[in-house]
Image: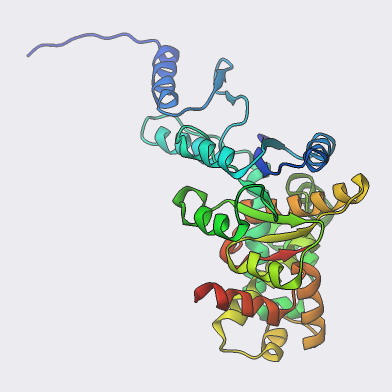
Amino acid sequence: MISVYLTYDAQEVYMKVLEECLKETSLKYELNGWGEVKFTGQPDITEVNEFKNKLQGTGIYVIEDPRNELIQRIKDTISEMILLHDNFKSKKISTYLTEKLNYSYSYLSKIFSEYTHYSIEQFVILKKIDYAKKLILENKLSLTQISYKLGYSSVAHLSQQFKKTTGLTPTTFYNIIEKRKQ
Amino acid sequence: MKRTFFKLAIVDDDEYSIKLFEKTVKEIKLWVGLMVFRNESELTAYLSDRQNNVPNILFLKLNLPDKNVLVYLQELRKQQRLQNTLITVYSVTASEESIEEVFVNGANIYMDQPRTYEEFKTVLEKVLKINFQYLESNLNIENFLYRI
């Protein structure tokens, strides 16, 4: 049996592993002491994500910004609410978000628009129209049924909001996507 | 919080339009960087170098200096690495027919280009903000069509 006794500098190990992972990307970076990598210039977000993936299994962990995570949870809750339309009709978005996320609506609105450049209300409309598009293209439901499913008071209301959000009527939208397939 | 930085590219040979883009990007408080290409060959050359980052948002003038925009849209859409790039085509005037063709051939947005700076700024800001939502949220890019 042979024993080898080791001593190590944790920071040096950390820096070496980190630099190995960074070298594999074309990102420009600065290392600000412990725990922060600053990507300078115009970093490519996909490369930044690849870098994060490379860290997996190295023992170095990415600390996600808690506010970023909250924005994601707001978006997920909105999607969930639109898909489970029963909740959608009976509850206001503000009540639903407050109950689910345990923050005041004014705090949620503020942080959301600050980071996404969209208000929660605008995002809800965008998400609803995105879902309406999916249903229109599936061609299983009529526009009247879709407007009911999404909680609109009438087809006219849905069509109006569709036009306002996309600049196109539902019919024009449908025709363009169909032509793309040809 | 580290914010996402979006890369914009425009292909246009008109100096006035280029200035409008540059001025707006500088003034609006959004995290964007702008690359200017005077014609499609410049952009093609840039994209052919794999080391270069692809733009997140691409603006093409409807009347490109040296290529039909519909043909160019088809070529761009065939490239795997441009699958998630949002493409806007813009013009001061266009017929309904050509706007529809632009969408059918792969553009996400058609933008009526305003002539004055103030109007241009308002419209471009709207276009960028809706683009951000598509780039950062779980929304369907394939069905993303927007006319402004």
Residue B64 is left or right of residue A3, and the answer is right
Q: Position of residue B60 (x, y in %)?
A: 67, 50
Q: Residue at x 59, y 17 (%)?
A: A32
What is the image's colouring? rainbow
The image shows residue B31, relative to residue A117, as above or below, that is above
Residue A67 is left or right of residue A32, and the answer is right
Residue placed most toward the observer, A53 or B103 = B103
Q: Position of residue A78 (x, y in %)?
A: 68, 65
Residue A71 is left or right of residue A34, and the answer is right
Quarter location, residue B26: top right
Q: Position of residue B53 (x, y in %)?
A: 53, 36
Residue B106 visible within the image: yes
The image shows residue A8, relative to residue A170, as above or below, that is above
* Residue sitting farthest toward the front: B66
Quarter location, residue A150: bottom right
Q: Residue at x 58, y 37 (%)?
A: B42
Residue A102 visible within the image: no
- Which quarter of the figure is the N terminus of chain A placed in? top left
Q: Residue at x 64, y 75 (%)?
A: A133
Quarter location, residue B96: bottom right
Q: Residue at x 77, y 42 (%)?
A: B14
Residue placed most toward the observer, B120 or B38 = B38
